[in-house]
Amino acid sequence: MGEWTAGERFAFGENWARFLQTVDEPRIAAAEKSLREGLECATLGGRSFLDVGSGSGIFSLAARRLGARVHSFDYDSHSVGCTRELKRRYFPNDTDWTIEEGSALDTDYLRSLGRFDIVYSWGVLHHTGDLWKALDNVCPLVSPGGSLFIAIYNDQGTRSVRWKKVKRLYNRLPRGFRFLVVAPSFLVLNYHHLIKDCLRLRPFETIRNYGGGRGMSFWRDLIDWVGGYPFEVATPKQIFDFCKVRGFSLSWLSTCGGSLGCNEFVFLNTGSSQPIAEAAPGG
């Protein structure tokens, strides 16, 4: 927690507000597909869904369209506003979708929420400033037999350390100078796609067709990656071990193949927690 200051925190909500301009039916459908695949179900009808760090709100919207009763919250007031805007567009005055401002590090707030059939937090907990406390806080929110669907940045060792420095620099720079970080990062992350597309005589095809598998936007994802700070990482084994002793069994996994990006996990709450004898990884 002491490695960053409030002034270094990336403005996630401002980035999501720009993403809302691109939200359309194909993007929402992609978000729905992502939920169905990870949760291995066709519908969420009759189930309760907690979106921890709702961001743009597109996955809260997807869950609601799949039939879930949804509770969304985010630490960033702009993200809360984005989620409320999507509700206004698609589910105005809907009593089965509630939206609040709250933090995954606020244990009192989380305890007030109760328990949910599905607790969803994709790419959020590693941006709280205390990944392991945040994960420890959300585990009890999953009902017995319920699912915890999370995505956490993959630990790449020294590469992750370098990216952390890039992210900190981005947020310390005045806005007018941040392109000095974004431009080289864009090339580092995409040069192989750019070369391949040019050789196929289809320049920028990969960028034009980008969806991230989840209905996301290339440029918003790029800025989110370069600027996303605080920034923590974990290996799949660390996440698995952490959740196992808290009574969770792994039901679905999608890794990024040891490279840049997030590993996705769906755990089932078996209710068979074990004594926790040591500090959390990275704690």
Image (cartoon, rainbow, N blue to C red):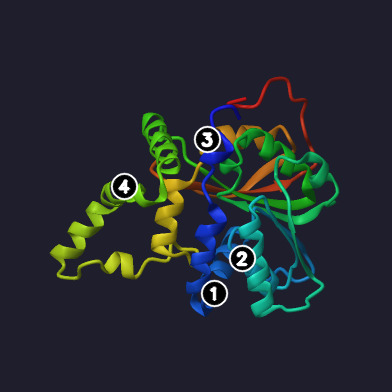
Seen from the viewer's position, the closer of residues 54 and 268 is 54
Say which quarter of the image contains residue 60.
bottom right
State if disc 2 and disc 1 touch (CB < 8 Å). Answer: no
In-image side of 209 versus 135 (left or right): left
Query: Tag 3 or tag 4, which sits nearer the N-term?
Result: 4
Marks 2 and 4, Cα distance to the nearest angstrom? 27 Å
In-image side of 249 versus 29 (left or right): right
Query: Tag 2 or tag 1, which sits nearer the N-term?
Result: 1
| Type of the residue with mark 1 | Ala
Q: Quadrant of the N terminus?
A: top right
Seen from the viewer's position, the closer of residues 256 and 84 is 84
Q: Which residue is labeled 2 in the image?
A: 82
Which circle, 4 or 1, is nearer the viewer? 4
State if disc 1 and disc 4 touch (CB < 8 Å). Answer: no
Marks 2 and 3, Cα distance to the nearest angstrom? 28 Å
Query: Tag 1 or tag 3, which sits nearer the N-term?
Result: 1
Assess disc 3: are there few (<14), some (14-19) or many (≥20) residues with their C-alpha within 10 Å of its C-alpha.
many
User: Could you tell me residue 183's position as x and y percent?
Assistant: 29, 51
Q: Work out whether residue 170 can be spotted.
A: yes
Q: Quadrant of the C terminus?
A: top right
Marks 4 and 1, Cα distance to the nearest angstrom? 29 Å
Identify which residue is drawn at 70% across, 71% down: 64
User: Could you tell me residue 181's position as x and y percent?
Assistant: 33, 45
| Type of the residue with mark 3 | Ala
Identify which residue is drawn at 55% across, 67% down: 31
Marks 1 and 2, Cα distance to the nearest angstrom? 18 Å
Q: Is residue 168 above or below residue 226?
A: above
Query: Tag 3 or tag 2, which sits nearer the N-term?
Result: 2
Q: Work out whether residue 261 can be spotted.
A: no
